[in-house]
Amino acid sequence: MATFSLRVTFLLVTLFFLPLTAQSAGCDCSEDDSSRNKTEARKLHIIAIVTILSASAVGCAIPALGRWFPAISPEKDYFFLIKAFAAGVILATGFIHILPDAFDKLRSPCLPESPWQNFPFAGFGAMVAALGTLMIDTVATGYFSRRHFKKAAAAVTDVDVEASVEAEREHADHVHMHTHASHGHAHGASMLLNAASTSQLIRNRVISEVLELGIIVHSVIIGMSLGASESPSTIRPLVVALTFHQFFEGLGLGSCIAQAKFRLKSVVTMSIFFSLTTPAGIAIGIGIASSYNENGQTALIVEGLLNSASAGILVYMSLVDLLAEDFMNPRVQNNGKLQLLINIFLLLGAGLMSMLAKWA
């Protein structure tokens, strides 16, 4: 419930700032109108909404199919390869696509020299977002772990009391003491195994929630930028690049959701929410296209700061919560072939996503 409220609040805050991006702050930097074709642009926008929505949904759904198809279950070793590839995509998205764009916007000549030209706000914003993600990550994991184990401890105590009373009725004192002690040792070992499994499950759930939050920030922004453009020559390569971009990001997010073992309703909700963010951004961009000035001061500042924050979140999540956790997993450390392959897939994901920066 808390996570859902966080999503809704963040989306409302983002939508609150969107009308501001439509206001021109009187900057002399004007847009190039020579390549505009509104009719052709609208056709491409519709194609973009359909293709990006489909690619996002398919990418996010593939890992979730492991519920019904054991061959693609998160328990398989090659699932590490899928996650490494997807983590490379997310890492390149943060470093190659989003952070440079944030620097460009916040260092634009259309912004006043003071303070925007005198301080690296994009890097600062990314750092603050990464630190904030770390704090949210650790606090949320600790909170949900403590809450779960308090409930579990209370339930175990009640069960042990009932078992002890029943045993006293049915056994002699000596036999009861021996049996109950043996049961206590077995139960203690089982509790330790369950605790470790539950801690990892809680960790995976927090990771998937925070990762989705970071992804939807820039998904709305890139969708809005695409929707606001009325230049077919600009839109065409963006549609292709963003389709692949959203597919691979969906694959990464879907992998985390699959490992978190949410209920089916939650999996569907999170997948739909991710799939709709970029198309929703495109629709918003279309709505404000007539008055939107991408070189307006407010647009540059809001988009630049949100992009820098998104970059910080994605870089942190990919390095700390996805790559470090999987690369240090005993199943990877004890398998030389898997260790080699996971590095190759990481480089492939980061390299292919970096190549897309040529078009988007």
Image: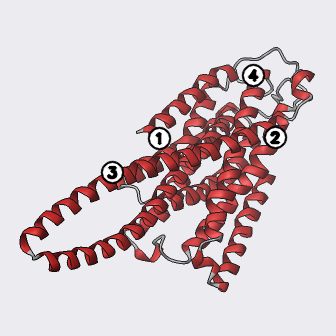
**Which percent across, then down, holds residue 230?**
71, 33
User: Which residue type carries mark 2?
Assistant: Gly
Q: Identify which residue, 231 or 53, lies in the foreground.
A: 53
Residue ID for mark 1: 3
**Which percent across, then down, holds residue 182?**
27, 78
Label located before the other in sequence (2 or 1): 1
**Which percent across, then down, holds residue 99?**
78, 44
Residue ID for mark 4: 298
Residue ID for mark 3: 151
Label located before the other in sequence (4 or 3): 3
Secondary structure beneath dot 3 equals helix
User: Which residue type carries mark 4?
Assistant: Thr
Residue ID for mark 2: 123
Label located before the other in sequence (2 or 4): 2
Q: CA distance from mark 1 to mark 3?
A: 20 Å
Image depth: mark 4 or mark 3 in front: 3
Secondary structure beneath dot 2 equals helix
**Callout 2 environment at 10 Å: few (<14), some (14 to 19), or many (20+)?**
some
Label located before the other in sequence (1 or 3): 1
Identified at 91% across, 28% down, the residue is: 117
Residue 217 visible in the picture: yes
| Quarter containing the N terminus | top left
Image depth: mark 2 or mark 4 in front: 2
Identified at 74% across, 33% down, the residue is: 305
The reply to whether the C-beta atoms of the residues labelled 4 and 3 are less than 8 Å apart is no
**Callout 1 environment at 10 Å: few (<14), some (14 to 19), or many (20+)?**
few
